[in-house]
Structures are given as C-alpha cells and as structure tokens.
Amino acid sequence: MAFQKYKRPPRKINRAIKKNHDSIQSLADGLLTRHGIKRQVEAASVVKGAEQWFTVHLPEHAVQDVIAISYAQDILTIGCMNHGAMHLMQSLRSELHTHLVSALPHICLTTIRCRLLRDSERENKYLRS
C-alpha cells in the first residue's frame, strides 16, 4: 500500500462572525468587549480629549497647571496645581462637558470634578506623560 501525501482540509469561514459584524466599528467594539478593555480605552479617549481641549481653550499659563487625571464611573477628575487654575476650571466645566459629550457621543459623562493636587502628585512624572 502506497502512502499518499496528507492534504489539509480547507478552512471554514466562521459565518457567525461574518454575519454579525458588518462594519469595522462593530468588529472593533466586539473585540474590545471580548477582551475586557472597552472601559480602559473609553477612559483613555476621554482623558485625551480633555487634554486636547485644555491646549486649545485655556490660556498658555494655565495649560501647565491643569491635568486630566482619570475617568471612572462616569466622572472625569481634573487635577489642578494651584487655586487659580482650579477656579478657572470650575468656571469652564460646562464648556468642557459639552465638548466631550459632542466629540465622544458613546460616553456617559455625568460629573467633572476639579481637585487640588498634593505636593507629592505635583512632582509625579507619570501624571505628565
């Protein structure tokens, strides 16, 4: 009996994935949800959007004094280096809120908190990256 060369059977296309994901956006959403990183990516996009808003709408001297720290449980936390920057951000919170909600319609931003940074946080090189 002669041996025949093994031939791999053709691959089957997973029709469930092909049918359910008709666009790249829904495919990316499914991928992020499946791997459990959707909230982290959403938080990073909110913080990055706030940082970009700071550079455009704040005076030059205040941009270095304000930093978006975190976005968790629908709350954006902004850290301020001094009281003047904190007062400025409290007066501009509503404008920042409307910008973020219009730029990122998939998020649910309920509150923007401004807080004064402690001395140890001011020198933290990881906050300023």
Image (cartoon, rainbow, N blue to C red):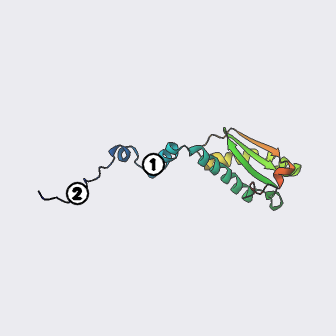
Point out the image quarter for the N terminus: bottom left
Q: Nearer the viewer, mark 1 or mark 2?
A: 2
Instruction: Kindly report the distance in space between the C-alpha atoms of the residues bearing marks 1 and 2.
Output: 32 Å
Q: Nearer the viewer, residue 87 or 118?
A: 118
Q: Quadrant of the rendered structure where residue 73 is?
A: top right
> Which quarter of the picture shows residue 38?
top right
Q: Amino acid at mark 1?
A: Leu
Name the secondary structure under disc 2.
Answer: loop
The residue tagged with tag 1: helix, strand or loop? helix
Q: In the rendered view, would you say 55 is above or below 114? A: below
Label 1 neighbour load within 10 Å: few <14, some 14-19, many 20+: some
Q: Amino acid at mark 2?
A: Lys
Residue 64: image location, x then y, percent: 80, 58
Residue 81 x, y percent position in the rendering: 84, 52
Q: Residues within 10 Å of mark 2 (few under 14, many from 20)?
A: few
Residue at image position (64%, 47%) is 43
Number of numbered discs = 2
**Looking at the picture, how far across and down is residue 118, in whole percent?**
85, 48
Residue at 71 percent of width and 46 percent of height: 70
Residue picked out by circle 1: 27
Answer left or right for 60 relative to 106.
right
Q: Which residue is most to the bottom? A: 60
Q: Which residue is at a point 45% across and 52% down the rendered structure image? A: 24
Q: Counting residues from the N terminus, which is met first, the one under dot 1 or under dot 2?
A: 2
Q: Which residue is mark 2?
A: 7
Please name the residue shown 73% across and 59% down the image.
55
Residue 124 falls left or right of residue 2 = right
